[in-house]
Image: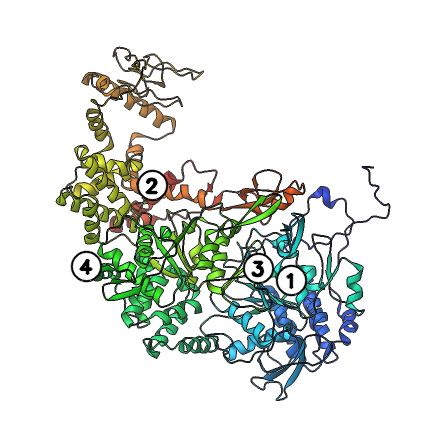
Amino acid sequence: QQLVPTHEDFRVIALAVPNPPFTSLARSIDPPLRSRFQIRRVDPMPSHELLPVLRNQHPNDTTSIATLAGIMDEAASENIQVRPFPVHALTATKDTDNLQFSELLQMYAAAHPEWGNEASQKALETAWNETMQNSNFETSCHFSVQTIEKLKSNCGQMATVELQNMNNYYSDEKKLIIVPCGSQALQGTDSILQNYVLTSSMQEVFASMVRQHQSRDLLLVSPSGEGKSATANYFAKRLGYAVRLVHLFPEMTSRDLLLRRSTCPITGETIWEDSELVKSAKAGSLCILDGVDKLRPNVLDSLQSLCVDRDIFLPDGRRMMAPQKEDTANENKRGGIVPIHPSFRIVALASPPKNRSKTKNFLDEAMNLFATIFIKAGPNSHEEACTRAILTSIKNPDCPEDTINKLLLLRNRLTVDLAEDCGVAPLSTRNLIRVVRRVHSHQDLANTLLQSIFVADLLPPSQRATLERMLNDCGIKVSSAYGRRRSASAQKQGAMKVEVKDDSCTIGSFTIPRNNAIRPEMVPAPKFFDIPYHVFTIQDLLRDWSRGERAFLLLGNQGVGKNMILDRLCQLANFEREYIQLHRDSTVGQVTLQPTLEEGKVVWKDSPLLRAARDGLALVVDEADKAPTEVLSALKGLMEDGELLLADGRRLSRHKDSSSSSRDIIPVHPDFTLWVLANRPGFPFLGNEFFRLVGDCFATRVIANPDLESEISLLEQYGPNVDPVLLRKIAASFAELRHLSDVGDLAYPYSTREAVAVIKHMEQYPDDGIIAALHNVLDFDSYEDTVYTTLAKVFQEHDIPVESYGRWKKVLARQSSNLEIEFYGSRSAESTSSSPPPLGDPKEGKWDDKNEAHVGGNQWAGGTGGSDTAGLGGRGGPYRLDRGHKVHQVSEEDKAKVSEDTKRKARSIAQKALKEKLDEIKMSTGDWNMYQKFTDPIRSDIVKLRSILNQINMTQTERGWIKQQSHGELDDCKIVDSVVGERYIYKRRGVVEDSVSFSRPKRLRFVMDCSASMYRFNGFDERLTRELEVTNLIMESFAGMEQRFDY
């Protein structure tokens, strides 16, 4: 009964794309699998066979279309970089009888993303020139939609669209096409979306979307913040579509896009629930898939049958397919067949990959699924007119036209390449809107808004100077001393009084009504000292909140007080606060809902995010830079698009949607505020690049360490009994350390937190002294002599006698000699170590081939804790020799018994050993001295470079969740599967690879000038000396890293 026979006629037909040339779409097939198949190559349809296929659909210029496709296919056969012309785009397009060939080709260009492949672009231009000899190659669709009217017929949800040629290039006649539409009323252009302006360029995009969606799903591509979501929603409202929004992230599987498992709330039986995509397909809605570029290739590929053929098998055994000519009701009676509504369409949204050579090129795959339409952003007249109209429509009386002109000039000049040189991202439309809404003066524009958007305070000095020159060139005057002036401004308002009443809070001249907290225990009550800088920052944040801002991002180094500032803000405004701390293993599911099994039923527990959004609370998301970017992308969708799909099928939404029942919609409270805290991007912080990806969705503030006077005021609160003079020296020393970190001389950015820790120690243990308190924070760097020397020098310059670590150990030993550990109850006395052997003449010692551990003797080389021989931890030996054993340290008292004569003999033996080592490596004493000459000046640089190189291995690969595992951590999405006995219900953290790859060391090549001029002119500018120092820097820094670097 357990044996199921395989039918003799059973066959497998596998479909695949070749690799090469489609390296981004396919892996190489494993030889044992490949050898079991009989291979058949399927070439594109030749021109003479394509003609009859196209004749019925395109009676006009059929020969021209087939000719062009044939030329493209011939080019693809000769050059593997050229993509074959997508024939399915020709055969799928309908109702184009009244369009000229050149117009059709402009539509088909959407199936060939022009920027994606230079070879394909060139081949397409060549094919155009050979086919249309008297027409220029053009891929823009210069049409606008004049009217859209629903058809009153029994043929389903259809509408007639009237198109008008915008430049009368082809003809003056208006064209009518029939397209699908939604079930809702069609809306006009007035007041559809706030601040959405339909300029000429956006009219072309909208017209192209309308025409392409006749028979295909759409893909909108543009950089972040350029209006993809707004355009998709505008398209939906004009055509009467109900919208279902799905935010995509890398964790999603193919099954997540279609169905999810759950349990019946009444019986507890396991059931399948339709996803938003399937619900849209059944109801004829518009499904917006936001972030298809984030999906793993196999997940996106699973939608091909749905997008191309409107036919897909669901995980529960049902089959979704387009309705046939026979009655739909009869199809339903068969069971297992789910009809796809004819008006159902997908609009996918994506951002272009930043680097095509290193990023999976999702467009190669997407062009087979969608008609690709680009919303271009850049310095041209159409885009500038569009942006100007959007910014002018905001109608901020404090933002004159001159300010808008300067912003547009800055956007045009700040190209992608120049922005990369400045270390910032180009200005998106979303950021420009935020600036125009908030600006109140020219000084506010230069010194607050743009500085916060570009996080200029966190840029390296050279890049910050480049950015400031760019701002000044655009007429936006900004001083490089911005940070100091802002602190000075805060200091001037040092008398800024904080007055809290039951119903209001006043900070200086600004007053805000206090919230009526329903749960007072949720309002923080921090131990906070009001210093000018922090009070100024809180006032600035609350002022923006009162103007309607609800998404904030606080960036800064560790220990600058981000959490404390927010807690104090919530206390003053009486905000109830929820809190989430993210980490590298955080998932979207953990942030939104937590499923549990109770009595055989899945019960969803509300997360802090859900409670805060529903009840209008403040949600603090801490350590955001440590979380995977898809988690923050989900938060971005909630704040920017106003929607977030939950795991149980419900949606958080700011919009009222008639297509969904009230049970499925959780309205977002208008007071819900998201406060995101993160460390600044870049070394030495080990966070992700979330600011570059989603930073423009938040009102960003850089939280720096307080200015000197504010920090002194803070330290006085923590150490009222500490000498004020000493307290000022400590504050000045830490300010100098931060400056060294900013210029790159120190890797670790010492913060106010460390300064407060020192003062708190001195306040509680005044007898320990300042040096002991400082070592509580400095001992991390005591293992790097060069770094520690730099730290000691800074404190010495401020009259704080920090000495070498060796001397500090001696002081500590003397101070701790009187300390004892007192045990309560009976305990045997502790034993003491035996004394090392009596001192004799120094010697190298005997060599032990077995390399056994020798402790406390005076016979063997490489021993520990002994006398006379080369080793570690002992006394009187000629030099250190480490053979890998545990070190036993001789006391300082025993070391002091070594005579000067013994030390002299030990130095003589050490020098002899050094000479022998130099002879072994063929280096003379002169060579050694010369090597030291060129190495000593760069010791600190070697330490810093090695520190940076060591971090590369930690950040070069980011781990992700690997699902469908037989062991690991239980996957929240697989709880129901575990009930029914599914085995692969676990997930594990690991490196997620889109394709098979092998770890290879990074290859670096350094070119050194060894010409005679280097020697000849060294006396003039020391060029040879500097080159030798650089050479030593490279060799010393990369030593021992051969597994990771090939140089």
Between circles 1 and 4, the one closer to the viewer is 1
Regarding mark 2 in the picture, which secondary structure is present there? Answer: helix
Residue, x 23% and y 38% (percent of image)?
A: 761
Regarding mark 1 in the picture, which secondary structure is present there? Answer: helix
- What is the x, y in percent for residue 585? 49, 45
Q: Residues within 10 Å of mark 2 (few under 14, many from 20)?
A: many
| Among numbered discs 1 and 3, the one appearing first in the sequence | 1
- Label 1, on which residue? 279
Q: Residues within 10 Å of mark 4 (few under 14, many from 20)?
A: some
- Label 4, on which residue? 494
- What is the x, y in percent for residue 341? 70, 68
Residue 611 in sight here: yes
Regarding mark 3 in the picture, which secondary structure is present there? Answer: helix
Residue found at the very far right of the displayed protein = 8
| Among numbered discs 3 and 4, the one appearing first in the sequence | 3
The coloring applied to the image is rainbow
User: Would residue 542 be found to the left or right of residue 85 on screen?
Assistant: left
| Among numbered discs 1 and 2, the one appearing first in the sequence | 1
User: Would residue 553 be found to the left or right of residue 724 on screen?
Assistant: right
- Label 2, on which residue? 942
In 3D space, how far apart are the residues under numbered discs 1 and 2 (Cα atoms)? 60 Å
- Label 3, on which residue? 292
User: Would residue 1005 be found to the left or right of residue 334 on screen?
Assistant: left
In 3D space, how far apart are the residues under numbered discs 3 and 4 (Cα atoms)? 50 Å
| Among numbered discs 2 and 3, the one appearing first in the sequence | 3
- What is the x, y in percent for residue 786? 28, 38
Regarding mark 4 in the picture, which secondary structure is present there? Answer: helix
In 3D space, how far apart are the residues under numbered discs 2 and 4 (Cα atoms)? 44 Å
